Image: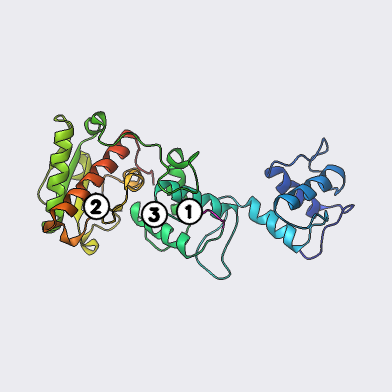
Amino acid sequence: MLDPIRPGDRGPAVEDVQQRLLVLGHDLGPTGIDGVFLGATHTAVCRFQSEHGLAEDGIIGPETWAALVDATFTLGDRLLYLRFPYLHGADVRRLQGALNALGFACGTPDGIFGRFTERAVREFQANVGLPADGIVGPDTVRAVEHLRHVWEGKDPASPLALAVAPARAAHALRQTRVTVTWAGPCGKAVAERFVNLAEATDPDALVALHEGDTDTSAGIVVRVMCDLKSAPEGSPVVDVTADTPAEGRFITAFAAVTSAHPVVVMVPADAADDEHAAQACAVRMLDGVCAALSGNVGPVVP
């Protein structure tokens, strides 16, 4: 926008403003988008300015125009990535809310794509088997929107605000065959405890321990390891090394799993020697797997 748009102006620029106001739910009166900046359009502009802490002068100057553009971005309209000055807008705020609810903490959704948001994006991308480059392009948007039924309607400011099934629900372990493999002593320690917990929860659980690689076409394969360098390329990765719930990350990873890749679960390197750490990881795994299976999450379609 080169020049301010003032009451009484007419033309395509006014139509653009009216279209954005209409998208935001403002009432433009019976004439709607007519390219004339009078009456209901002027009232809507003043209301928009008031809602966004702008001077209520009814004029579309640079600040009001920038706020209108920010407010009408939808996720997928543009690439989102870390730069300075930071990218900002409603699309960033929607992304932050979705990631928060899925368990990838961005902090309070403020619509600003800063370092915390970029870190959360990288973690989410790794979790769904995408290149963890921190750039929100079509593939990342598709993965987020595929999980809309999981995060939509949840508190966008609260990480792990998921309404998931109760942990260790017996029926969840009977729904899908899960084969658990491992790499290294740390992986074996956690994998064995996970399977023992699952079988103790439900003797009919479709969970089995398998040494070495296995065919992923037989169901979901979970590979437990502590060295990400040896993980199969393109596999969704769930990190359970932190002492925090992992339900959201398992739901995300199970939604992204395909017949070609296992779900990789990262555990601490000391799990082989620390029984407490190994058991804690196994419990978080079981909670996460049950949550994912209870949600009936299907794989992402390329």
Earlier residue among tags 1 and 3: 3
Q: Main secondary structure of the magenta part?
A: loop
User: Would you say 107 lies left or right of 199 here?
Assistant: right
Q: Looking at the picture, which amino acid does disc 3 mark?
A: Phe
- The image's colouring method is rainbow
Name which residue lies at 41% across and 41% down: 162
The label number, if any, that marks residue 265 in the structure image: 2
Q: Is residue 247 visible?
A: yes
Q: Which residues are magenta?
A: 107-111
Say if the magenta span includes residue 87: no
Alpha-carbon span between mark 2 and mark 3: 14 Å
Q: Position of residue 301 (x, y in %)?
A: 38, 43
Residue sitting at 58 percent across and 50 percent down?
A: 74
Q: Could you give the CA–CA distance between mark 1 and mark 3, rounded to whole angstroms? A: 14 Å
Amino acid beneath label 1? Pro
Secondary structure beneath dot 3 equals: helix
Amino acid type of the residue tagged 2 in the rendering: Val
- Front position among marks 1 and 2: 2
Query: Is residue 257 depicted above or below 66 in this figure?
Result: above
**Does residue 108 belong to the magenta stretch?**
yes
Residue ID at (68%, 44%):
23
Screen quadrant of the N terminus? bottom right
Assess disc 2: are there few (<14), some (14-19) or many (≥20) residues with their C-alpha within 10 Å of its C-alpha. many
Determine whether label 1 and label 3 are within 8 Å by CB.
no
Which residue is label 1 attached to? Answer: 138
Contact between marks 1 and 2 (CB within 8 A): the answer is no
Label 1 element class? helix
